[in-house]
Amino acid sequence: FRGVIFDVDPVFSNTEEWWLAIPEHLRPSKDQPFYHLFAENDETEYVAYVSEQNLVIDETGRPVRHPQAKEFFRRDRKGRYQIDRAGLN
């Protein structure tokens, strides 16, 4: 999947149920930043909660399809996402 970060928690701040649903051998440490993303995969768009250790830079240069990404961000000439202050209240 890929996406645009829109918020960050300095440490894990989701439910214990969510964390335990991750297979133990893949489960990230809670004492790292976790990011909220407007995310997508080949099939759908959704909001993801991702540990810092699982983030990688998307080098495709393609825009994200998630409709909320377009509400809060604009892309600069290099394809990077910048907060669109006009969309904020």
Image (cartoon, helix red, strand yellow):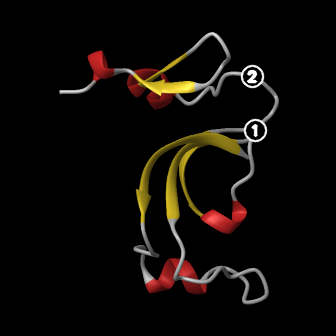
Task: State the image coordinates of residue 17 (x, y, percent, origin top left).
Answer: 49, 84
Sort mark 2 into few (<14), some (14-19) or many (20+) by Cα contacts within 10 Å. Answer: few
The one nearer the camera, 80 or 68, is: 80
Callout 2 secondary element: loop
Residue at 39% across / 27% down in the picture? 72
Q: Amino acid at mark 2?
A: Arg
- SS at circle 1: loop
Q: Farthest residue to the front: give it.
A: 78
- Residue 63 point in image, percent of width and height: 67, 22
In three-dimensional space, the C-alpha distance between marks 2 and 1, rounded to whole angstroms, equals: 9 Å
Label 1: which residue?
58
Q: Compared to 28, does 48 lie above or below?
A: above
As rendered, which of 19 and 43 lies closer to the eye? 19
Task: Tell me residue 70's x, y (percent).
Answer: 47, 21
Horizontal relation, residue 52 to residue 38: left or right:
right
Q: Amino acid at mark 1?
A: Asp
On screen, residue 2 versus residue 48, left or right, reads: right
Q: Residue at x 73, y 46 (%)?
A: 1
Q: Residue 40 appears at what percent x and percent y?
A: 65, 40
Mark 1, residues whose alpha carbon is within 10 Å: few (<14), some, or many (≥20)?
A: few
Q: Are marks 2 and 1 in contact (CB under 8 Å)?
A: yes
Name the residue furthest top.
77
Q: At 28% across and 16% down in the image, what residue appears? A: 86
Residue drawn at (42%, 68%) of the image: 10
Per the image, the residue denoted by label 2 is 62
Left or right position of 86 against 65: left
Q: Is residue 74 above or below residue 29?
A: above
Please tell me how many numbered marks the rendered image carries: 2
